[in-house]
Image: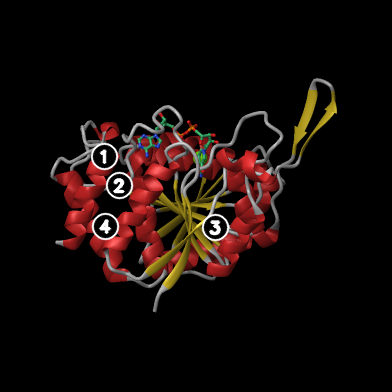
Amino acid sequence: MTYTVTLIPGDGIGPEVAFAAKRVIDATGVPIEWEIVEAGGDVMYKYGTPLPEETIESIQRNRVALKGPITTPIGSGFRSVNVQLRQRLHLFANYRPAKSIPGVKTPFENVDLIVVRENTEGLYSGIEHVVVPGVVESLKIITREATERVARFAFEMARRDGRKKITAVHKANIMKLSDGLFLEVCRQVAREYPDIQYEEAIVDATAMRLVLNPHQFDVLLMENLYGDILSDLTAGLIGGLGLAPSGNIGEHYAVFEAVHGSAPDIAGQNVANPTALILSGVLMLRHLGEQEAADRVQRAVEQTIAEGIRTRDLGGTATTSEFTDAVIARVQA
Ligand code: NAI
Ligand code: MG
């Protein structure tokens, strides 16, 4: 069976890392026909919108997409394409594993965390207005429905992957209603999974505890903004944004992308680390049920890095394409 998968190259380093990931996935021999569609700041002038309808329709048709990062200009009238995609396709859970890669020097070894981030509401609902000049309101939306969906996703994933513990991360001591509801729903769902240990932790203290000893956590479940921030932190624990993959998962569709953004500071130089997007491709292959190919790519990436072939962010000198070629050689070996 040939899969059809939507590929969105994206902005900045997006095309460099997206096509690198595509080449690696193609090297596994899993038959994938890529439908390449556009989104992002670079195509705004062509379509009048950074998120053309045909891009949404492509994902709806194929149900699976691999996506490069997309620039969100600050202060422009356009809302984040990433946030819009997640909301429009009901990609309610953002799954962000942070797993140490052998040989990458970091303060901790064997970090193996998963951040599960609610992906459609919270402070990223995009409901903002000027009350009077000099005063603005940004609303934080928490619903029982979305919280229950993402909590259930986290517990089901924990059960499937043999995870032991879920920590619900919150600030319910201050945001009594919104985070209060989030916690209440997490507790209810947790009761249905007595085999998974459940605990709660306040977000600021969690940030501190993560950098002191990440091994005290397993799966971290939280609302949108906290998840955005803490998943960059967990990416830092394993060696940086160049290594951290993610999956945006809904009932009908799944979009896989790196945690990092379009990195305009290094775009077009062939120096970006494609690992994060290649590992997002690994998550995608697993989602498709192609476990053997996924394992092969995962191992090839680990071998390449362990053998010292590394991009600049990891202290190496390999270009994006040299690193990618090395991974492909090991996928095919
Ligand atoms: P960023 O993640 O693009 O870059 C932060 C730092 O990490 C930069 O120094 C960059 O060079 C480095 N970096 C990121 N990815 C790397 C890689 N693969 N290899 C080597 N170094 C890498 O974050 P920033 O600068 O805050 O955001 C840039 C743009 O990306 C913004 O417009 C932002 O809105 C957008 N963005 C998009 C995301 C998405 O499409 N899912 C996610 C995060 C940000
Ligand atoms: Mg982010």
How many angstroms separate mark 4 from mark 1 (CA)? Answer: 20 Å
Q: Quadrant of the C terminus?
A: bottom left
Residue 298 marker = 4
How many angstroms separate mark 2 from mark 1 (CA)? Answer: 7 Å
Query: Residue 304 at x, y = what percent?
Result: 18, 48
Nearest to viewer (mark 1 / mark 3): 3
Callout 1, which amino acid?
Phe
**Disc 4, disc 2: CB below 8 Å?**
no
Q: Secondary structure at mark 3?
A: strand
How many angstroms separate mark 2 from mark 3 (CA)? Answer: 22 Å
Mark 3 residue's CB less than 8 Å from ligand 1: no
Query: Residue 228 at x, y = what percent?
Result: 52, 42
Q: Is residue 244 visible?
A: no
When the figure is inspected, residue 1 is found, relative to residue 288, above or below; the finding is: below
Q: Secondary structure at mark 1?
A: loop
Q: Which residue is mark 2?
A: 111
Total marks shown come to 4
Give the farthest residue toward the bottom.
1
Q: Which residue is mark 1?
A: 108
Callout 3, which amino acid?
Ala
Nearest to viewer (mark 4 / mark 1): 4
How many angstroms separate mark 4 from mark 3 (CA)? Answer: 23 Å
Q: Of callouts 4 and 2, which one flags the residue occurring earlier in the amino acid sequence?
A: 2
Q: Secondary structure at mark 4?
A: helix
Callout 4, which amino acid?
Gln
How many angstroms separate mark 4 from mark 2 (CA)? Answer: 16 Å
Nearest to viewer (mark 4 / mark 2): 4
Mark 4 residue's CB less than 8 Å from ligand 1: no
Q: Secondary structure at mark 2?
A: loop
